[in-house]
Image (tube, rainbow, N blue to C red):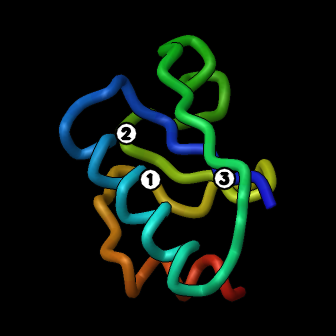
Amino acid sequence: MRIEVLGTGCPKCETLVKNVTEAARQLDLQPEIIKVTDIAEIARRGVLMPPALCIDGEVKLVGKLATVEELKGLLES
């Protein structure tokens, strides 16, 4: 599983990385977690309001700081 957090490195983006890492740990997953900070790359994916979350190349969340519980739901589906 490949998880990408798209954002410029703001506090919300960093918290999303932390939350997704914790959600994966709680689910006993070992995904590849990547931070994408290049604004051109973020825009190319159609994200206009970071942070955003991509799971295996599919944008699942945009402009929202998800909780660990919300992220667990996304990772399980």
Which label is found at residue 51? Answer: none
Residue labelled with disc 1? 62
Q: In terms of image quadrants, where is residue 51?
A: top left
In this view, the residue in front, 48 or 33, is 33
68 in relation to 66, above or below: below
Position of 38 compared to 14: left or right?
Answer: right
Asked whether the residues under the numbered discs 2 and 1 touch, taking CB atoms below 8 Å apart as contact, a structural biologist would say yes
Whole-angstrom CA distance, mark 3 to mark 1, is 14 Å
**Mark closer to the chain start, 3 or 2:** 3
In this view, the residue in front, 49 or 17, is 17
Q: Nearer the viewer, mark 3 or mark 1?
A: 3
Q: Residues within 10 Å of mark 1 (few under 14, many from 20)?
A: some
Amino acid bearing label 1 = Val
Q: Residues within 10 Å of mark 2 (few under 14, many from 20)?
A: many
Position of 28 compared to 53: left or right?
Answer: right
For the point 39% across and 86% down, which residue is it? 69
Amino acid bearing label 2 = Pro
**Rendered location of residue 48, percent (x, y):** 43, 33
Amino acid bearing label 3 = Ile
**Rendered location of residue 35, percent (x, y):** 53, 34
Residue labelled with disc 2? 50
From the image, which quarter does the N terminus lie in? bottom right
Residue labelled with disc 3? 3
For the point 36% across and 23% down, which residue is it? 8
From the image, which quarter does the C terminus lie in? bottom right
Q: Residues within 10 Å of mark 3 (few under 14, many from 20)?
A: many
76 in relation to 62, above or below: below
